[in-house]
Image (cartoon, coloured by chain):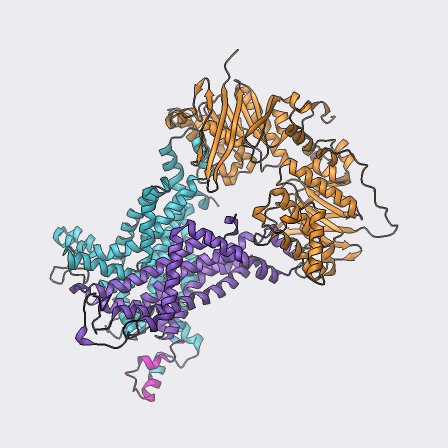
Amino acid sequence: MTEPLLKVENLHVSFSTRGGIVEAVRGVDIEVAQGGTLAIVGESGSGKSVTAYAVTQLLDRSARIPSGRILFRGDDITRASSSRMNSLRGAAISMVFQSPRTALNPIRGIGRQIMDAIEAHQNLPKAQVRARALELLEAVRIRDAAGRFDAYPEELSGGMCQRVMIAMAMACNPSLLIADEPTTGLDVTTQKTVMDLLARLTAERNMALILITHDLGLAARYCRDVVVMQEGKVVERASTAELFGNPQHPYTRKLVAASPTFESTVDDLVGEAPRPPAPAIARERGAPPLLDAEGLVKRFGDVAAVDRVSLKLGRGESLGLVGESGSGKSTISRMICRLVDHDDGRLLFDGEDIGSIPARDFHASPRRRDIQIVFQDPHDSLNPRFSAFDCIAHPVKRLVKPQDAAELKRRVEEAAERCGLPRDLLGRFPHQLSGGQKARVGIARAIAVEPRLLVLDEPTAALDVSVQAVVLKLLDDLRRDEGLSFLFVSHDLNVVRMMCERIVVMRQGTVVEEGASKDLFTAPRAAYTRELLDAIPHFEPQRALAG
Amino acid sequence: MSSTLRHAGWVLRGNPVTAFAAAGTFLLVAVAVLAPWIAPYDPITSNVSNALKPPSAAHWAGTDQLGRDIFSRLLAATRLDLTIAAAAVSLSFVAGAVIGSFCGYVGGRLDRWVGRLVDVLMAFPLFVLAMALVAALGNRVENIIIATAIINLPFYIRFARAEVNVRRHAGWVEAARAGGDSHAAVVLRFLLPNILPAMAVQISLNLGWAILNAAGLSFLGLGVQAPTPEWGIMVAEGARFIGTGQWWLVAFPGLALMLAVLCFNLLGDGLRDILDPRMRT
Amino acid sequence: MSVAKNIGRRVVKRLGASVPALLGVVVFTFLLMRVLPGDPATFFASGPNAGQEEIDELRRQMGLDRPMYEQLARYLYDVATGHLGRSMTTGQPVLADLAQRLPASLELSFFALIIALALAIPLGIAAALKPNSLIDHAVRFVCTLGVCVPTFVSGLLLIYVFYYLLGLAPDPTGRIDIFAAQPPEITGFLLIDFLMVGDLAGWRAAFGQLILPAFTMALFVLAPLARMTRASLLAVLGSDFIRTARSVGMTGWRVVIVYALRNAMLPVLTIIGIVFSTMLGANVLVEKVFSWPGIGSYALDALLASDYAPVQGFVLLIAAIFVMVNLAIDVLYGIADPRVTVE
């Protein structure tokens, strides 16, 4: 049996913080062989990134490794000197980081930065280093590599920056590459090209790859083995096929269940028995749709962020709006909420022309109460100086105008209860709540005024999968119980499919395709929709998309 | 409110420097209020036979060229200097916070112009501007306050603008509008309270700066006039005797200035911790 | 090189952009001097008891009876052609007075800036490289004290210690001993002029006079410079791209010098502009303490004597210097931050 390339034994990492010592990693064992691919999967706070940084000694100053061993090619490098680590980093072990834009030096040309990486280990004439850097840029498929050699990171897209980052990591042919959430913040389609590139390059060079991710789909698609971490410990390790086919640990099972697939329903995500699909609300004949937007246009300067988009949404219906960043989906949600004005088009709510009321004055309109919105980042959407109670109470005070404090209290508590928020949390401030709890406050605030249309702007994009599952379930229940209509905006096709009957796919401000969720998934008409579907990482290879 | 106080107590216990600054500030304010009653001598009446005496048990900080007790003059000056600084800073804070946050919230062309104007003003030698203003408006205490307020104004505008700017697209701001608030209400009820902690830090730091400015102007002979006790004038009067070794005429008013500014600066740093709810556990 | 061309274009653009700022200052001084103090003619009249006739005559002479816009136009024309009026106290044209005194102020300010930078930047770097160490605390202590002590107090205390107690410094009056020989007027900067004629004794004497006021001023601006250096270097050292540089195996020193310092100096460069303009203001105080014959003390004397033409000339001159300094900072910034020139 050959010796593994990297072997981590019983690793402990702790941080000294204001609140005392925090143990981030508590006894982790990991092994990767030469040329192997390992995914470390876990939610935020699981210690997966800390483990990786411990290997390369890039932890910050407050971190300590009280016990454990890190063996690289059989050598113990746990407490290796900084000069030893400098000779290993880049040459033997490299890293690719998340948010590639900030990971590159903003005032140094990208070619120059790759040259720096080469020069850190090889003493070659300048011209040769430059030629090698150019080769690397071409290897990571930067178009017009020679022309972009002197470009600065901000002149490149996020995906391009990540390719440059990969080129830097590969510069000295290391034998181990650690990629820490390399696709966070990138669009789905870019995500796929970057990951494909990373997988191909490591395979070609027989490099070992450790992929750190929260996304089970990515792990399944690109790695042979998986390690699942929770709260600083490894809870399960297995080959990918085994782990996803037959998860053993309850946490893994929960995680696998919570990750949306092409077939799962909202009930699957939280491990409940499936219910019949939401009963279609009987449409009254002749009644206008709840929302009827026609030819909406929004321009920023000369650019049309939204270009003649039309939508119709019936009572009790849920419509999904899908697109990548820059598709104009968030702008549409704000126009429909009457938070920003449209430049052209018509907006009817229940047959009433609400588009003619300027956004500036809409707060005083009686329709304000009927259209509410849930925002993307639950943390960012709560006033840091308001308690949870005040957050929910604010729109009630303004729009419902309760008789007295008792009625206000009753309404707020009712809304909180419907969103599964325990009463004792209502006195807390946002920074004292978890991400999931904040999301619930945001939803409670929106439904407390009993709206008829709820616009959901990526309501779960900032949440861990297991929390996302619970929040999606909550939203679905609310819709069933209260007959709300949803406009569900998301970049995640799987989520939208579960939550919506119909889907509108957008790209660069225009509608690409529109149809019933089922049809769109089984028979996408537009090439772009197909590309989007194809880019979704999934972990049931046998059930991959036909065609 | 009580949680804020409790938190303040907790911060002060864990942070002796801030506690020192808070105590110092309290002492300064107490002296400013009580000066006429606690001063051992009259700060104005001169007694030439007792001139230029070094510090002693009778005169803790010595006497000046007219035989006046320097310690009593220092106490009396505290009231004037703090009043000037407080008045100037409150003027510029109120005007700056309102102008700045509305500009930052509205954005667009107006905001860009205001931003550019403020940048130019801030980079301009503000002390020279203050001198010119006092010269033009007339050599009076009110005008020192106005001049100091005007040269402080750009800082507040810029600060409020920047703070509002980073928040104006926050979810909770949009949520407030979806919750039925007008633009003006959003600025006044949501954004201003949120930027106040940061502004409080700025106010504290600015108080120190305002004191330095006012004292500097008086040192030059602008604004407050002799024989009124004021730290800057006292230094100016003592300057004539430094070459002959009567150090106490300059050192004590200088020390008073330094301590006052030091307290406000340290308090500003401490306030940052106390008022930030994210630090509260 | 395209970089040079880019910078050239920026300079032209910046100069163009500074025209409104300068114009604003001119109009501001016009309003300040003509409108606010009431009737300027009463100031310029022979005395408080001047008769109404004399005042009316003066008004006619000064053009004060003309409409406001005409006065402004005339004033702008005068400023543009260098006619800043005549000082009542010296009897000389203001422009000549200012030109004669400017080198003294500039020499003091530049020398102080050099001292401040030479102290502040290494201190800031040392503090940032070892946060929370003894040196960091020491730097913070010095900085905190530095901003709290007004220049006029620290200047006087320095005089007390180095002139009165230790006798190391010369009599703190002026740029040069009254009995020493003046160097020939070449640049107006004494240190440079003495060097050019090779008079080392004279150079030493001028240096002795300069060191205390320059140090006083440097002490005052030390804090913002050192603080900014520390804060921005700390921020850069904690940023993602430094981690990247370390992850490819670059050594610690190379990371600091090639990656961190250059990026960290960008905000410091901006603050140097602000610091220099603070120094122009503080000049007035320091010049008064050390009887330094610069433009600050000139303007102050005029101000106290209600002689307004020099004051207004001084404000305009400061504005012009301020524009030049900002231009220089901008060019340096353009060289240091390639992103600016790329656009």
* Nearer to us in this view, C14 or A510: A510
Residue at 29 percent across and 61 percent down: it is B255
Outermost left residue: C179
Task: Pinpoint residue B178: horizontal percent, then vertical percent.
Answer: 67, 55
Residue C4 appears in the rendering:
no
Residue at 19 percent across and 62 percent down: it is C174
Task: Pinpoint residue A222: horizontal percent, then vertical percent.
Answer: 61, 25
Task: Pinpoint residue B158: horizontal percent, then vertical percent.
Answer: 47, 58
- Chain B drawn colour: purple
A537 displayed left or right of C245: right
A226 displayed left or right of B81: right
- Chain C drawn colour: cyan
Q: Is residue A407 magenta?
A: no
Residue C256 position by quadrant: top left
Q: Is residue C56 magenta?
A: yes
A218 displayed left or right of A267: left
Residue A490 appears in the rendering:
yes
Q: Compared with residue B83, is residue B6 higher up or lower down, i.e. above or below?
A: above
* Nearer to us in this view, B265 or A315: B265
Outermost right residue: A285
- Chain A drawn colour: orange
- The part of the chain drawn in magenta is C35-57
* Nearer to us in this view, A360 or B112: A360
Q: Compared with residue A268, is residue C120 higher up or lower down, i.e. above or below?
A: below
User: How many callouts does the rendering have?
Assistant: 0
Residue A539 position by quadrant: top right
* Nearer to us in this view, B196 or A528: B196
Q: Compared with residue C11, is residue A470 higher up or lower down, i.e. above or below?
A: above
Which quadrant is the N terminus of chain B positioned in? bottom right
